[in-house]
Amino acid sequence: MKKPKIYIAGPMSGYTGLNWDAFDQKELELISAGWDVVNPAGMDREMGIDPNGELDEYDYEDAAGRDIEALKSCDAIYMMAGFQYSKGACWERALAKHWGLPRYYEIPRADHEFPIDREPTLFDNVIMADGYSSSDDIRMEHC
């Protein structure tokens, strides 16, 4: 049976090492939950991006096109904590929503697409692994 594929979206710019450690940790958690994972940090590594280099050298347009193509191949998207402060993660979320992909959140909110009172799934254990509950709230900046 083919594993469902999920794309990780979250903040990178402004974080130490482009937040790759958090993306890599989330990838391991999602793999252990049964997902085939698309990790943009891994794709950046393959492109030769230096996570500690000058961001001026980072070609956002090429990365954005690559990320859109990767997201198109996925069955769902996973929104990491802080995604709402990342313009890139916000447009990834918007595209996933437009395409009808299920959207999962590291920090669930009552106004997000998958409420707590739905039938639980294996993936719920990953969402709740950090101890957050549906009553936790975060300020929305970009999306």
Image (tube, helix red, strand yellow):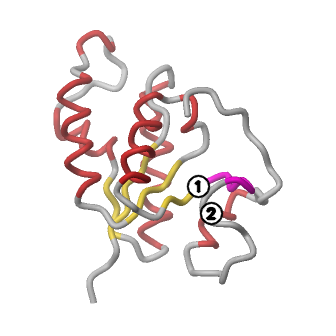
Mark 1 and mark 2 residues within 8 Å of each other at the beta carbon:
yes
Callout 1, which amino acid?
Answer: Tyr
Does residue 2 sit above or below 49 in this rendering?
below
Label number found at residue 85? none
* Along the line of sight, the residue nearer the viewer: 26 or 82: 82
- Dot 1 lies on which element? strand
Q: Mark 1 — residue?
A: 105
Quadrant for the N terminus in the image: bottom left
Give the residues drawn in magenta, as a range.
Answer: 106-111
Residue 79 x %, y %: 52, 49
Residue 107 on the magenta segment: yes
Q: What is the distance, in whole Å, between disc 1 and disc 2 at their CAs?
A: 7 Å
In percent of width and height, residue 58 lies at 25, 19
For the point 42% across and 77% down, the residue is 34
Depth check: 100 or 64 in front? 100
Main SS of the magenta part reads: loop
Q: Is residue 94 above or below residue 63?
A: below
Q: Position of residue 50 (x, y in %)?
A: 28, 24
Residue 111, image x and y in percent?
Answer: 70, 53
Q: Residue at x 34, y 62 (%)?
A: 37
Task: Give the residue drawn at x 83%, y 55%.
Answer: 135
Indicate whether residue 28 is drawn in magenta: no
> Badge 2 is on which residue?
127
* The furthest residue to the bottom: 1
Residue 101 falls in image quadrant? bottom left
